[in-house]
Amino acid sequence: MSEFKLHCFALSGNSYKVALFLALAQQKWEQVFVDYLNGETRTREWRETVNEQGEAPVLEHQGKKLTQSALILDHLAQVTGKFGPENEEERQEIWRWMLFDNHKFTSYYATLRFMYGLQKSGETPVTQFFRERVRAAYQIVDNHLGKTPFLVGERLTIADLSLAGYVFMPEDTGISKSEFPNIEAWKARIQAMPGWQHPYDLMPGPTSAI
Amino acid sequence: MSEFKLHCFALSGNSYKVALFLALAQQKWEQVFVDYLNGETRTREWRETVNEQGEAPVLEHQGKKLTQSALILDHLAQVTGKFGPENEEERQEIWRWMLFDNHKFTSYYATLRFMYGLQKSGETPVTQFFRERVRAAYQIVDNHLGKTPFLVGERLTIADLSLAGYVFMPEDTGISKSEFPNIEAWKARIQAMPGWQHPYDLMPGPTSAI
């Protein structure tokens, strides 16, 4: 029996943040498929027994259920000793980027990709709004990655794993990869690490929404 | 000279999270007005010298600049000994709600309020989209606050201060307060605390956008 059980699904980049940690840290883990597309996370039962916030991922570990990808990454770094901060200054730097990720970098991109790339909404005022926000957030990260190989210094940390949630997702969002060359170079560094797998190979369930 | 210097502006609920901490913790602090409406946070100079992520609040303390409201609250709880977690379980609960706040509760509301309440955009596909997301996030918090007086247990913590960022803002968002009675009761509990002040009384600058 593996120590970690992850409630996840292939389309969920927020789940991928945690799945990729477990893969790169070479941990054994079990999958529990979350049927998000059919509304499982919106049912009363799932909210009462798995996560009242209605979101994947959820990590079961040592009899407890942990939610929020950044908090799960923080926990995994502590218990495995991998990809975490080495001092208080690094801890603050890591959280600074994980928070920016939750508020903007992942959040805006995930919404745009879901509507435009998966639901095939076509161009709407909402997709235009989000694409503009994505570009602003991506530009901030691209500028930062022009100065440093990983988000916090010279090595991969959970900050990188957080921001990597959706960057390998293949769907079209109307944004060209060439707009953010430093992000592309950073992605290549992550992809070259031993154990790296694509989200659709690492997690269960369908890889299209329609 | 006061120990804390906060870069903030009255309309910024993310700044209010920190200003309200300082007020309730009865700390002395200095204000630095951020001229967000005239584009100060988007200038190269501000990004290079104050915050590369282009956001308020920024807290100056002990010669360092801290950004991201949740991380600033975490820091203030540590250095003042107030409103922080008392054990590891509380620490995780606090972060779980602060992350939900950054991703959804504050984020969606702040965007809706800025467009609909401050820019007077009128109803658009984008405001409709955000209002639906706000309602879903508010319902999750309202359900939670039906079971507990504060987000994490029986006392005010930095989780409450994070989610309180925009809830006292007076602008119309097309959502009635009566939809979320448990949030209203929680707001009243916060508002009754010694030292509480309205965001527009606590921070500098204009209180309308047009």
Image: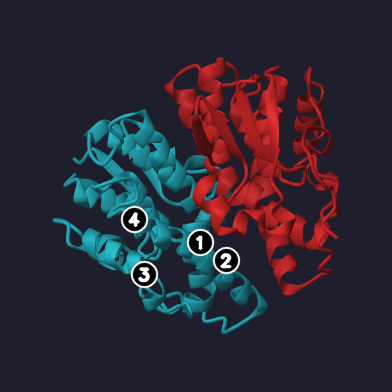
Chain colours: A red, B cyan
Q: Is residue B51 above or below residue B17?
A: above
What amino acid is labelled 4 in the image? Lys
Q: Which mark is residue B137?
A: 1
Picture coordinates of residue A101, whole percent (x, y): 60, 44
Chain holding disc 1: B
Q: Nearer the viewer, mark 2 or mark 3?
A: 2
Tell me the quarter of the picture where residue B185 sits: bottom left
Q: Are marks 4 and 2 on the same chain?
A: yes
Residue carrying label 3: B169
Mark-to-mark CA distance, 2 and 3: 18 Å
Decide: few, some or many residues near mark 2? Use Cα within 10 Å; few <14, some 14-19, many ≥20.
Answer: some
* Marks 1 and 2 on same chain: yes
Q: Earlier in the sequence, mark 3 or mark 4?
A: 4
| Residue that carries the numbered disc 2 in the rendered image | B133
Question: Compared with residue B136, is residue B162 higher up or lower down, i.e. above or below?
Answer: above
From the viewer's perspective, is A106 left or right of B2? right
